[in-house]
Image (tube, rainbow, N blue to C red):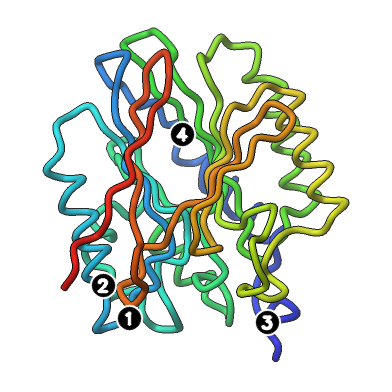
Amino acid sequence: MKGMFSPNGETIDARFEQSLAYNAARGEIHMDMQADDYTIYVCTDSHITRKTHRNLDYFVAQYRAAAAPKIALHLGDVIDAQKNFPCADSILHFAGQTIADTLFVTPGNHDIYFKQWPIYRDFFKSSVYWFDTRNGEKKLDLFICLDSAEGELGVKQMNWLRSLLDEKSKEGYRRIIVFSHTHLWKLDASQGHTSNMALEATYEFTSLLSQYGVEYYWCGHQHARQVVRFKGVTYMVLNATKDSESGQSYMIAHMGENVSYDYIDFPKE
């Protein structure tokens, strides 16, 4: 059961340190949307295998065909099990998260369990990072990606997040959005011990987001849509992208002075 109840590979602190080293070498990511309004395509939990990646391919195709300005997020569990990363041809086109990229990925538990972090890192480079959207010199929205693949954030990542929010909350962004994989309040016990973070960690994390005016936390993992408003922050769990599950969808967020959402069902086979 190693890998299910204890790390079988790099710990969250090790992944965090490697991610920040890559970020420092890469430089900051500022997405010039050339407009105040833009769209974000968001999916999660595609759980692809060698034979099942129809919905993920559909999501990426719809995103690519959409009118600019746009960006996209995948909220983790890209793959279902070991050795399936090479099957994600449609999403790996964006691997590396360089300044020219428009699709960003955060790791899920399926992505890094069983010593898969080096493989994930080879494809996506970093599991903890931030980027912002701009219209020329005008700052729009700040996005912070957190690594919650083990159901915890770790002391180093939490300290980094606290310092980053303290700095960036003063820079005049119209909103701050945090995205990751693990949700905070489970609907049922379907995800077992990985369902959510420990109570004390949840209290500290939610208090921190509220303190610095974070507007949204976007995540997946539960495979069931949920919206919770808590202490001024909207916590949104998205449906899955997994082929074998019925009633699943992805989200298109319309970003402007206000935010609105459309949920798009995947076509039936």
Q: Mark 1 vs mark 4: which is more N-terminal? A: 4
Instruction: From the image, tell me which residue sits under label 2.
Output: 53
Q: Residues within 10 Å of mark 2 (few under 14, many from 20)?
A: many
| SS at mark 4 in the image | loop
Q: Cβ–Cβ below 8 Å for labels 2 and 1?
A: yes
Nearest the camera: 261 or 85? Answer: 261
- Nearer the observer: mark 4 or 3; the answer is 3
| SS at mark 3 in the image | loop
Splitting the image into 4 quarters, where does residue 55 fall?
A: bottom left
Q: Mark 3 vs mark 1: which is more N-terminal? A: 3
- Nearer the observer: mark 1 or 4; the answer is 1
Q: Which mark is on residue 27?
A: 4
Q: Quadrant of the C terminus?
A: bottom left
Q: Residues within 10 Å of mark 4 (few under 14, many from 20)?
A: few
Q: Residues within 10 Å of mark 1 (few under 14, many from 20)?
A: many
Q: Amino acid at mark 3?
A: Met
- Nearer the observer: mark 4 or 2; the answer is 2
Instruction: From the image, tell me which residue sits under label 3.
Output: 4
Q: Cβ–Cβ below 8 Å for labels 3 and 1?
A: no
| SS at mark 2 in the image | loop
Residue 213 location (% of width, % of height) = 67, 21
